[in-house]
Image (cartoon, helix red, strand yellow):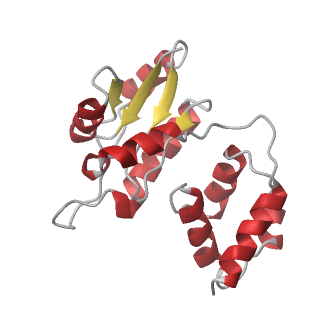
Amino acid sequence: MSSIIVVEGIHDEMRIKSIFPQAQVLTTNGREIDPNTLSLVKKLSEDHSIIVLTDPDGPGEKIRSVLSQTVPSCQHAFIRKKDCISKNKKKVGIEHAKKEVIEAALSQLLAPQEQAVFTIFDLYDLGLNGLKDSKRRRDRLSDLLNIGRPNAKTFLKRLNMLKISKEKLEEMVCTITDEQ
C-alpha cells in the first residue's frame, strides 16, 4: 500500500518533494480544512496509508486532530518545534526543517493501537497529570519521545501509539524526575 503525506501548506509540500521527489503529498491549505479535502483524505485512505505531518503549533495540532477523527487509521510523524524554526526565528513550519529531521520523522511513524496500554489513571500515578508540575513533566517526556507537546488527553493517545511498556515509561519518568 502506498502512502500519502498530508501537510498544511504548499511550502511544506515543496519541502517534502525536494527530499522525496516521488512522494505523494496532499495539502490541507492551512488552518481551516475544507470539507472536500477531508472527504478526499477519507477516500484516499481506502487505498493508501495516510501520514500526517503538520507544524508543531496550535493550528497544526488542530489539523492533526481533525484528520485523526476523519481517518482513525492515519499514521503520525512529528517534528519538534525547535527543529523547524525559520532562519529569522519568526516562523514555525515543516518547510523550515532540515532534510535529516524530516527523514527521521517519517521513519518513526506512530499509528493507533487496537488496545490501549495506558489509561488516564497511569498518568496520575506517574505524576503526568493532576500535579502542579505535571505539564512540565509531560513536556519533557514528550520531547524525549518526539511526540509534540500535547495536553494530557492527547499525550495519552500518543503514548498508546508508541508500543512501549509500562516499565519503560516508568524508567523514563524516573529519569526526568532525577533531572530536576
> Does residue 133 sit above or below 169 in this rendering?
below
| Residue at point 79%, 67% (across, down) | 170
Question: Residue 143 location in percent, x, y?
Answer: 53, 64
Location of the C terminus by quadrant is bottom right
Q: Is residue 129 visible?
A: no
| Residue at point 63%, 37% (across, down) | 111
| Residue at point 40%, 50% (across, down) | 60
Q: In screen coordinates, is 82 left or right of 180?
A: left
Q: Residue furthest left?
A: 88
> Does residue 133 sit above or below 109 in this rendering?
below
Q: Residue furthest front?
A: 100
Toward the viewer: 166 or 116? 166
Question: Residue 142 location in percent, x, y?
Answer: 58, 63
Location of the N terminus by quadrant is top right
| Residue at point 34%, 27% (across, down) | 26
> Does residue 21 sit above or below 19 in this rendering?
above
> Does residue 21 sit above or below 146 in this rendering?
above
Q: In screen coordinates, is 135 left or right of 19?
A: right
Q: Give the total number of marks visible in the rendering.
A: 0
Question: Residue 179 location in percent, x, y?
Answer: 63, 83
Q: Is residue 89 visible?
A: yes
Q: In screen coordinates, is 51 left or right of 73?
A: left
